[in-house]
Amino acid sequence: MENLTRSSVIIVGAGISGITAGKILAENGVNDIIILEAADKIGGRLMKEQFGGVTVELGAGWIAGVGGDQINPVWELAKQTGLQTYFSDYSHARFNIYDHNGKIFPSGIADETYKKAVDEAMQELKRQEANEGSENLISSEELSLSTEKTPIELAIDFILHDFEMAEVEPISTYVDFGEMEFLVADERGYDHLLYKMAESFLYTSEGEIFDNRLKLNKVVREVQHSRNGVLVTTEEGSLYEANYLILSTSIGVLQSDLISFKPSLPRWKTEAFGNIDIMVYTKIFLKFPYKFWPCGPNKEFFIYAHERRGYFTFWQHMENAYPGSNLLVVTLTNEESKRIEAQSDEETLREAMEVLRNMFGPDIPNATDIIVPRWWNNRFQCGSYSNYPIYVNRQLVHDIKAPVGRVFFTGEHTSEKFNGYVHGGYLSGIDTSKALLEEMRKEKERRSESQGFLLQPLIPLQGSSTMAPEDSASNLHKCDIPRQHFLGNCKLSLSEAIL
């Protein structure tokens, strides 16, 4: 077992919210921090991998919310660091819907089906708004499954709801920052933004972090917390003690049993965690010896209409971002993601090839490689991002983000307006660290007041012109508190203070 490591603040998780929180703390003079990351690198759900000769993003892949009156802070970071991005135009995807015979649905039918789906979704939103607070509300996916729909209707329902098209519901990201989305396709990876942020407060060299305040491969399993501080135990037995803890793990991890709390978190906190869904979003990448799909204007996205909702529905080629890469990406969500994660990559490849041959014919080449992320079965993530109810109870939002004593919570799931997005994680890191700094300031004031209160009785004893020394001593004895014991307690209480 390692020796106990002491710091002012422990941050659990080195994703965008954790790194942002550390940066804000450092900018405000709190450098005595420890960042504990379970994985072997920073980034969290910003996760790149080399595949097919290029860098692909297994996690977050877009900067959503660009082009509005307000500037998305992540877009601003991307511009500052020169991150390579490409505009994604989803508006033509519905005109590239293939049936199982490889025929594209006529644009008129596709457009009519799309408009009908939007109208139905708007009606459902109004119904849910009228029944706000009712426990009988069902999700859009459950609604689509409860009524008979054709394959094209199921496909359009999938892209409307699982891809959160802005025309269905007033998503704050698009309302505040704009409706454009940009694909991140940079050889340095989306997580390059985090490394640039880390450079401002952690020691780095040539893009690598060498600061011993960042601890990788440290899986937090237990958090003991009291009014005096926190004690964190990692899986291999390392101990870390601090005055405060910022927990930036995902809502999925908070719902799991990975981290135990002593004492247990209050019921209002665990119930709030349980009231938030965790979405699973899986991007499967396929490498081919050559491209066989259309790559002309407005052909970046194409859709497969199947009788099962979400079955290899949404496809994208990577030629715009990486010309000549011969890569396709198919996105699965939720139950289909969980099903795919439970089977072999070979079986997934077989299913994907069958779908592609239905669309493009039997003579297309086999994929030479496949990569299947497993976010649901990753115990450090337990899913992809949080999914709040459409109409959120204000108390739920408060309970999700509220600290428990000296344990603070951050992450995209704590962002009321931008949960589920990278900028939600970034802004939550700022909000949480500022809340902690304010608490530290108040604690310092309380300590100063307490110190003044404790020392005041000593003033007449040490310098009063109206009391003789012997009277002072006799008064001390009357209080039945030996002078050295009184001062000792005062010193002890100060040594336990946070600053």
Image (cartoon, grey):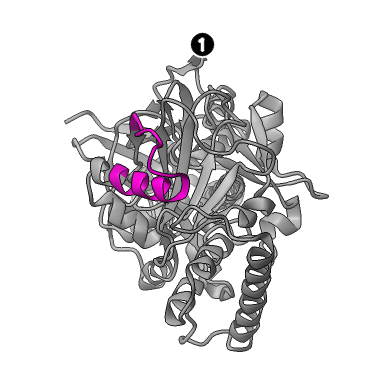
Is 207 in front, or is 67? 67
Q: Position of residue 369 (x, y in %)?
A: 34, 30
Is 98 in front, or is 254? 98
Asked if residue 68 is among those painted magenta in the image, a careful observer would answer: no
Dot 1 amino acid type: Glu
Give the total number of marks visible in the rendering.
Answer: 1
Among the 4 quarters of the image, the one containing residue 165: bottom right
Name the residue located 74 percent from the left edge and 59 percent from the top edge.
175
Which residue in the rendered view is the most extreme toward the left? 1
The answer to whether 304 appears left or right of 308 in the picture is right
- Against 183, residue 397 (above or below) is below
For label 1, the SS is loop
Mark 1 surroundings within 10 Å by alpha-carbon count, few (fewer than 14), some (14 through 19), many (20 or more):
few
Residue 32 visible within the image: no
Q: Position of residue 115 (x, y in %)?
A: 68, 70
The answer to whether 475 appears left or right of 62 in the picture is left
- Against 443, residue 18 (above or below) is above
Residue 338 visible within the image: yes
Residue occupied by mark 1: 206
Q: In what quadrant of the picture does the N terminus appear?
A: top left
Is 208 in front, or is 28? 208
First to last magenta residue range: 349-369
Is 360 in front, or is 10? 360
